[in-house]
Amino acid sequence: MSGRKVALDTCVLGWALRDKYTESDKAKKIRAERFFARLKEEKATIVVPSVVLFELLCVYSDSEEDTEAKIQFLDKLSKHCQIADLDIIAASHAASYFNATNNGDCGYDKSEREKSKRKADTMILGQAACNEVSDLITNDAGFISLAKALHESNKCHVSVEDIPEDPQMEIEEVIIE
Amino acid sequence: MDGYGFRFLSISPKDLSASKLGDLLKHYEAAIRSEYRLSTGDRPEDAGIVALSSIEDNCTTLRFVLSALFVTIAARIGVIPKPNQSFLNNYSPATRTLYHDFYSLSSHYNTPIESFAFSSGRPDDLRRLSIISPEDISRASSAIVESKKTLYGKVITVGGKGPRVGIELSESTVLSCIASRELALEAARYLYRDVRVRGEAKVVISLGGPSIKDFTIKEIEQFEPLPPTDLVDILKPHIKDQLNRIDNIEEFFHNLREEEE
């Protein structure tokens, strides 16, 4: 685990882990796959916050088949990926971030995002922050905006960004056009 | 124009690292701006200036000048409260971070810190606003909370008179953990390897946020993180069907964070 630690939001994992996509989703799917390949080149380590894991597990039903798949998924995930818990330190960070977005102390206007989303955002950020994560990747523009306010006011060191553009993909798109 | 400043009364200038000094300067400006925003509801943006006017006496005296709109705030912040005073909660997190910097510096370098005001016409006429001492810091209230915790990192040292295991959590963070002799010997098998460690953390809750004081290892095992693409390959067979059932996964996951109407 010598490289940087990167946490992933639920949608990013969802794009990477599914097969089915429409023609309009194709770019997002390819972008997620290429991003993962670049992380491998950088020797980055993936961190999955437990709040993200909770959301991901919501795709399983209670059927026998799904339950078996969920057990296998959790077994593989826990063996090969770092899961960030919501322990006392993460909870303390998350509460501090939430309050900063709630009282405008980080320069964030709370009317930009509803409370339940800010709660999930700050819990994920708290888990990332106390696990030495440097970057968190999400495709949620509202989450990025909230995290930017916390980052710029020196309250949270985690940098939250969209899946970075792939320069190679842009060239290919230009060629196709 | 009024100015404000801080003096470290018994510090060897060469001991004070540039990064700590830099953090202090940055946090002072952040504290002024956040208190201004709290008291007026306005964002000062670039309208007001918090400027470092001089660093004197080999970095042990810092003087600031501020725009007129910040002077009242600076006078309030300039009175550094004793760390055990309960009204610390009345300050913004940025100001509490600044005060934590002062408490850390005072404690770490064993130096009293004085804050003062001066007028630009008579810079040598200092009016003391407050003084805090290392003794004040040692009386600061804090709590130690025990919590179960999982750590991921690399074993980099094992041994010592009392068995200790050094876990590298990141390039800049190493935690020296307490372990039984048996667990230390087991940890030695994983030297320079990635491990997952479960144990009990003693977490200090104080003004500057929580931090791990002690960590006692209860369980250690080798951890084999997979590169991101390999991780996707190994996980996909066990979740792709479930994800494929969802027409719009962005909407599905975003809805999980929505409030009920």
Image (tube, coloured by chain):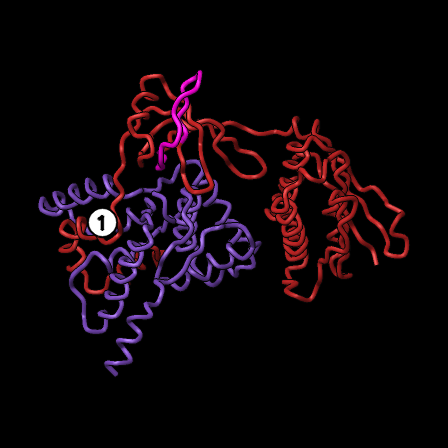
Asked whether A20 or B9 is in front, the reply is B9
In this rendering, the answer to whether A22 lies above or below B114 is below
- Disc 1 target residue: B231
**Left-right relation of B69 to B31:** right
Asked whether A110 or A158 is in front, the reply is A158
In this rendering, the answer to whether B175 lies above or below B124 is above
**Left-right relation of B125 to B21:** right
Q: Quadrant of residue B29?
A: bottom right
What's the residue at 46%, 58% (across, down)? A146
Quadrant (top left/top right/bottom left/bottom right) for the N terminus of chain A:
top left
- Chain that appears red: B
What is the span of residues highlighted in magenta in the rendered image? B150-166
**Left-right relation of A66 to A10:** left
Question: What shade has chain A been given?
Answer: purple
Query: Which chain is disc 1 placed on?
Result: B
x and y percentages locating residue A46 in the rendered image: 31, 49
Quadrant (top left/top right/bottom left/bottom right) for the C terminus of chain A:
bottom left
What's the residue at 32%, 20% (across, down)? B185
x and y percentages locating residue B7 in the rendered image: 77, 41
x and y percentages locating residue B25 in the rendered image: 66, 50
Q: Is residue B98 magenta?
A: no
x and y percentages locating residue B113 in the rendered image: 74, 37
Asked whether B43 or A139 is in front, the reply is A139
